[in-house]
Image (cartoon, rainbow, N blue to C red):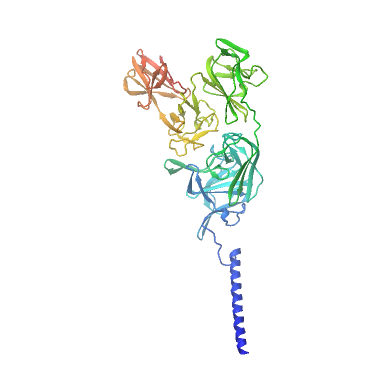
Amino acid sequence: MKKNLIKFSKVAWLMVMAFALITTSCKKDDDDDDGGGDDPVIVLDGVYIKGAGTALADYDTKGMMKVTRNEVTQEDRASLLELYIAVKGGADGFNIVTVEGATKTIYGPGADFAEVTEPDGDEPTLGLKRGSVAVTDTKFTVDADGLYHVAYDTEIGIVTIAKVEWGVIGAATPGGWGESTQLASEGFDLNTMTFTAVDITLTKGDYKFRYSNGWKVILDSEFDLGDGNTGIKVNANYGGTVEALVPGGANITNETPGYYTATITWVLGSGYSASVVKTGDLETYDYSATELGLIGDGIMNADTVLGWNYSLGLHAPTVTDETTYTWLYEGISVTSAGSFKIREGQDWNGKSIGYADLTMGGTAAANFQGTDPDGNIQAIEDGIFDFELIIDAVTETYTFNVNPAGVSFNILYVPGAHQEWDPSNESTVVYDGIGDGNYEGYLYFPEAANEFKITNGPTWDENYGDDGADGTLEQDGANIVAGDAGYYKLNVDFNALTYTALLTNWGLIGDATGSWDDDQDMTYDADNDVWTITTDLVTGEVKFRANDAWDINYGDDSGNLVQDGANIAIAEDGNYTITMNLGTPPYAYEVVKN
């Protein structure tokens, strides 16, 4: 009996100890779960967004900001962080908190943090705040419920908050590269938001997703990155592929024209996903068999006025990209005494196109005007011209390019700060006179550090910049930045996608000026886009040269100026005003004795 009592006591003791151990273990787990007791909550090192105005009321890895690309180099910058986050409008807002071990530092808006009232031309336009951070419990706030892009560079201590409303933009979209096609929000939610557009038209071409009509958000435009790169900026656009979106990535290609439903969805902690689904075929007119010609008393047929009964040059178009149709009319003689239209067939039962229907282009576009009230096309001066009619069947836009016959200058447009970023401005273009893909032109940049781009056409559909400031062009690349203000010689090799921009100052040189060694400086007249000099000359010869060197020098060739051309004769002593015009080819000059 004693042995049994001892055995029972040992068993009871073991059971008590086991119960105590189980009870103690359960208490510790409960404390870890709810953050109670003396045990601290473990938070990973990083930079967090945290606040009652978001879904992140406490520390959460979904609220940890991530390293992102600097738009300037399109490479990750270790100190540049971003997070897309849904935020309620009002005072709740959020803070940015850095966690380093046991140290947590809470940041809010600094004294200069404010609404950006005049964003840069490439920045979002639907709401942007920017400024420094400060160690404070004061919250970053937004005015309205919505999705926001928060960027923070820890090195310079600058934060930006941009309102996000997604759209698509590009050659394939209805607005081309100049205007976004908006995707509508399906409603505000702190954890997920979706933006959708139904039955939008996408042609064969490239496009991107971008938000709030912007391409980038600037944190510091002047920060020296080294290697000739300047600025800290985050991308406000996504490229790459629909299945794998990349901030600032390459253009997305749409191969099949049609109606599409485009969707982009944000999920807290997961980022973005997108879909672009074809829902129908485009209802476009097929112009491939449409024969168009010229008709009117403004057209000469040999030595006879054509009149209004017969269409000259009827032919079907060439077709590109399935929906773009082009008709060419070469060597057409026009008279300003009459006017003309473009007509289908030999009667008026089909399509007819007048001046009001056209978007004029080409180097001689200014020589033509519309007539009122019949809307015909009329030459201001008689001449012989090459005409090119381009119809975009998707948008039903008609472009009419006019060039002097036989000149056949191809042009690239150079929009930029010097002309208010207008890609259709034909006074700021460079020319290819022989069709070999090498373009040249002279442009005046009135301000230092002038930014510009190059476009293949009078729109933003196909535009080129220089991502590395290395003289190489990239489609949709960064703005090209010139040096000092002045008159630049711009050369573009469109085959190799390279360019040079050389600042030039011009002078007159020759024995008629007194020496072939020293230039007489000319003065640039910005109002008339010409170089002039008034000076005394003696009988002899002169030439024009740039930058006190012979690398770029112009002389005479059949009355025009060409590189290494013949010396220009000065027949007698006297005072002369000499003018040089490099605005459009062929380059010209004038020598007037006063």
Look at the picture and state if 112 lies above or below 4.
Answer: above
Q: Residue most toward the front?
A: 289
Q: Quadrant of the N terminus?
A: bottom right
The quadrant holding residue 119 is top right
Q: Residue most toward the top?
A: 303
* Residue 587 drawn at (x, y percent): 44, 21
In the visual, does 576 lie left or right of 392? left
* Residue 173 drawn at (x, y percent): 60, 35
Judge by depth and name the residue closer to the eye, 120 or 467.
467
In the visual, does 244 lie left or right of 507? right
The quadrant holding residue 137 is bottom right
Q: Quadrant of the C terminus?
A: top left
Q: Residue most toward the right?
A: 349
Look at the picture and state if 67 lies above or below 438.
Answer: below
In the visual, does 379 lie left or right of 539? right
Q: Is residue 538 something one can see in this rendering?
A: no
Label total for image: 0
Q: Is residue 565 something one can see in this rendering?
A: yes
* Residue 566 drawn at (x, y percent): 37, 18
Residue at 32% from the left image edge and 21% from the top image edge: 516
* Residue 410 drawn at (x, y percent): 49, 25
